[in-house]
Amino acid sequence: MIKKITTMVIALSLGGCFSMDNNKEEEKVKTSILGERDIKYYSNKTVTSLEVPPDLTKPSSQSAFRLSEYVKDIHEDVVSFSAEGVTDSGKKSENNSNIQVVRSGDRRWLKVNKEPNEVWNLSKSFLKQSGFIIKKSNKKTGVMETDFLENHPEIPEASLGMLRSALRSALQTTYTLPIVDKYRIRIEPINNGTGSEVYLTLTSMEEVLTSAGAKEENTIWQSRPKDQDLEVEMLYRLMTFLGSDRADARAKILEAKSQLKVIVKSLKGIGGYAKLEFSLNKSDTWDSMNWALDQLNVNVEDKDIKEGSFYINIARTQDKSILTRLFGEEHVQKSFQIMVKQIDSNKTEVYFNDLSEENEQETIDFSYEFLGDIAKQF
């Protein structure tokens, strides 16, 4: 009898990660001091079935203002699937960089007094030394993106309950949440290519328990709310990797003041398609759209700042199915154009354009969904 009770207690304790989801308890990790958070990424536990990289080899006829104008050897690094081969140019920079932190609302980014080519190599090295493999890399748009990697933050004592906490001490068991993270770094040339703006974005997914029947349970992966503290922590680490003094980087990130308030309206545009109205000039709207596309993890194949256009590949919601979850969405993705046009000094409109010119009602409906998701980022 005692053996059965002991088995039941241990089983209950081992089910801790699922009971948290059932009780809808989520403990957000807080860091009082940047740089001291214990981040545990398992580089030998890469999750590859969540997403298949899209084809980045499709040529573009657009004449764009691109990072490739300032980054050497454009063809050597279009797509990389290996964590090997970090060169000397990717070693951690000395602490002699003038790096500023800019903030707008919850988003922060860096202004670095280094050429984009140097920042590109350093950023790539930073991600690899953090345990990640660069899964997608496109110098035309200045974007590199990692694979998903398991992150097992330890569940706090308060969430385990007294019984499971005692058992953990006795059995030396660690409770973890099934979470995977990936990062996107975007580099934009400034000051005619003598400096760089650097943006870092975190995307997370979690495994949750679902019921497939009366006696059967399965798990699925689903999007997880962004851990803002973790994103800021990784931005701080990238900042020091690029050459900032630790104390200086910590102070700049914590003291950065929001400089821009973004007001966005969703309206009906030409041909029934949705459009957005920003209370900003074209340059600020362009930057805001770049950031929003990062947050939504949209594949930007090409962009033209002079024309004010983003060329994106994305799957419409109605085209997705269980197969896209298993094998990736690139097989059902379509190409669209997002155009930014200035109306007056403090008003800019953003249009959704179907490059196929088929103008299906499904695409018109999707334009409201997609631009609506953009608007929700602000």
Image (tube, rainbow, N blue to C red):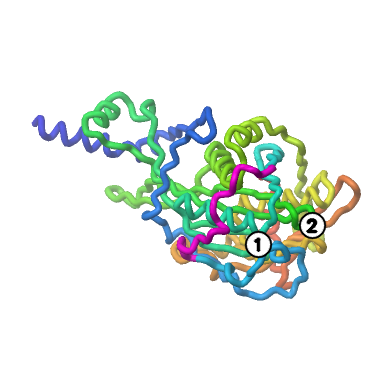
Q: Which residue is mark 1?
A: 300
Q: Residues within 10 Å of mark 1 (few under 14, many from 20)?
A: many
The quarter of the picture where residue 34 lies is top right
Q: Position of residue 321 (x, y in %)?
A: 50, 63
Magenta stretch, main secondary structure class? loop
> Please, what is the three-letter code of the amino acid marked with disc 2?
Asn
Q: Nearer the viewer, residue 232 or 120?
A: 120
Answer with left or right where residue 107 lies relative to residue 350.
Answer: left
Give the label, 1 or 2, closer to the camera.
Answer: 2
Q: Nearer the viewer, residue 274 or 103?
A: 103
* Residue drawn where x is 52% and y is 40% of the image: 230
- Does the stretch in magenta take in 51? no
* Residue drawn where x is 43% and y is 33% of the image: 25
Q: Earlier in the sequence, mark 1 or mark 2?
A: 2
Residue 305, relative to residue 283: is it above or below?
A: below
Q: Position of residue 58 (x, y in %)?
A: 63, 74
Which numbered circle lies on residue 192?
2
Q: Which residues are magenta?
A: 81-98
Give the position of the C terminus as an image quadrant.
Answer: top right
- Does the stretch in magenta take in 86? yes
Q: Can residue 300 be seen in the rendering of this structure?
A: yes
Residue 236, relative to residue 251: is it above or below?
A: below
**Total tally of numbered discs in the picture:** 2
> Please, what is the three-letter code of the amino acid marked with disc 1?
Val
* Residue drawn where x is 58% and y is 54% of the image: 122
Q: Nearer the viewer, residue 143 or 346?
A: 143
Label 1 – label 2 distance at C-alpha: 23 Å
Answer with left or right where residue 175 lies relative to residue 200.
Answer: left
The quarter of the picture where residue 176 lies is top left
Q: Position of residue 284 (x, y in %)?
A: 79, 48
Query: The residue tagged with tag 1: helix, strand or loop?
Result: strand
Q: Nearer the viewer, residue 12 or 250?
A: 250
